[in-house]
Amino acid sequence: MLPSKEIPSCKRFSGYKPCFPDHDCWENGCKDNIPIGTKILIINLDAMGDVLMTTAQLTALKTKFPKSTIYWVTEKNSTALLFNNHFVDHVYPFDAESILILSQMKFDYVMNVDKSQSSCALLNSINARHKLGFGLDENGKIIPVNEGAYYNYKLGMVDHFKFKVNQRTGQDYLAETFEVDYQRDEYVFNFTESEKKFIQNYKKEVGISEDDFVVGFNTGCSNLYPNKKMTIDQHIYLIEKLLGKNKPALPAGRYKIALLGGPEDTERNEKIYIEFWGKIINTPTTHGLRKGACYENISDVVITGDSFGMHLAIALKKYVISWFGVSCWTEIDLYERGVKLFQSDLFCSPCWKKVCPYNLECISMIDLERIIKEVDFYFEKHHSPASK
C-alpha cells in the first residue's frame, strides 16, 4: 500500500529518523529543503590513485549539474579518500549490501570509470536514463557505452596509441568520457579540522617548525606493479646527498627528510631509516589511509614514483618530483607543481609490464642528480631566506 503523503524529495530525508530533532518532516514538510536534483552514480573500483584522479571531474560535474546528488561506489579501501568531500553525497563500498541498495534506486546518470568486468557489469545492472563509460556486451566483453568513451577505450586496446601517440592526461580524456567540459580542474581531497590539528601536533612531535623545509620520500608503490619504485640504494644515495647540504649557517638544517608509505613499505622504510638513525623522520606506515595523508602533508616536496603516493601529493598540492618507467607520463598532470622524469628514448618504456625482461633499465637510469637539483631549485625559489 502506498503512503498517503508524498515522500520529501530532499537530500537530508532518509525515512529512518528526523532530519532535525525538533521538526516533523512527515507532517509539516521540509524545514530546510535541499533538492536531490540530478542523481549521478560514479563507479570507480580501480586503484586508489585512480580514485583520487577521478575526483578532478567533480567540479565539472557540479558545474554542468548544479542541483545534483552524487553517489560513488568504490572498493572498501578507497572509501576513506572520499570522506569529507563536499561534492560527494553518498559513498558505497563495493559489496553485496551496496549492490542490493543500488539495484533498488533510479539514477539520471551512471558513469563507469573502469575497464573491468565487475565495474562494467555493475553499470549494466544500474537503472539509469543515461550510461557513460564502459559496460559489458552479451558475451561479457568490455565495450564503450557512449561516444565520449571511444578515445578512452582505444587507449586500452592499442598499445602504440597509448604509449607513443597519446598526449592527453587522464583527467582530459575522462572528462570526454563523462561528457563534461575539461577545465583542468584539480583533485578534491579535504582534511577535517581534527586532521589539520593532528598534522600540526605531529609536526611539533617530530621537531618540524614553520621555517623548516621537508623533503618527503614516498619510497614504494602497490604490490601490483612492484617495478615502479626505486631501489633502496638509490633512496639512500639521494638522502645522503640532501643531508650533506645541511650547513652550520642554518641551525635547523637546510633540509629535513621524511620517509612516507603504506603498510607494504614498512620493511623497506625501516631498512632506509636504519642508515640514518635519528637524522630523518620515519613516518608510521600502518595507521590507515587518512593518517597516511596527514603524514604526507608535512612535506614541502614529495619525491615519488607513479603511485598512490604521487596522486596523493598532487591532491595535497605538493611540489612533486616523480619518475616514470613502466607507466605513461603523458597521462599525469602535476598542475605546474613539479617535474616528471622519464627516458623518452628508451624503446621499451612505457610498457605496463609486471615483470621486466630488460633488467629494469628505466629504474637504473633514473637521473638522481637531476632529482637533487630540482629539490635545490624549488628550495631556492620558494623557501630560502633570499626568496622571502
Image (cartoon, grey):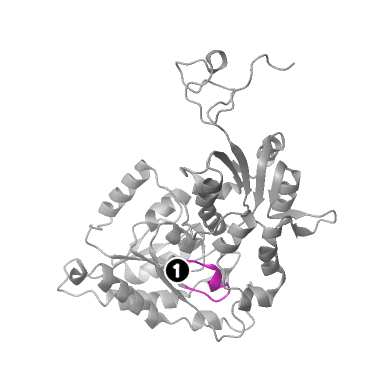
Mark 1, residues whose alpha carbon is within 10 Å: few (<14), some, or many (≥20)? many
With 17 as the anchor, is 163 left or right in this view? right
Look at label 1 and name its amino acid: Thr
> How many marks do you count on the picture?
1
The spot of residue 68 in percent (x, y) is: 56, 39
Is residue 205 in view from this perspective? Answer: yes
The spot of residue 255 in percent (x, y) is: 27, 69
- Does the magenta portion include 324? yes
Q: As displayed, is residue 161 above or below residue 109?
A: below
With 348 as the anchor, is 208 left or right in this view? left
With 65 as the anchor, is 140 left or right in this view? right
Front one among 198 and 38: 38
Residue linked to disc 1: 304
Q: As displayed, is residue 139 above or below residue 36?
A: below
Tell me what residue is drawn at x 33 percent, y 50 percent: 199
Determine which quarter of the picture holds residue 315: bottom left
- Does the magenta portion include 181? no
The spot of residue 110 in percent (x, y) is: 66, 46
Is residue 355 in view from this perspective? Answer: no
| Secondary element at tag 1 | strand
Front one among 72 and 372: 72
Front one among 311 and 305: 311
Determine which quarter of the picture holds residue 151: bottom right
Predominant SS of the magenta segment: loop
Tell me what residue is drawn at x 47 percent, y 61 percent: 309
The spot of residue 332 in percent (x, y) is: 52, 67
Region in magenta:
323-334
Instruction: Tell me the quadrant of the picture where the C terminus can be found.
Output: bottom left
Determine which quarter of the picture holds residue 383: bottom left
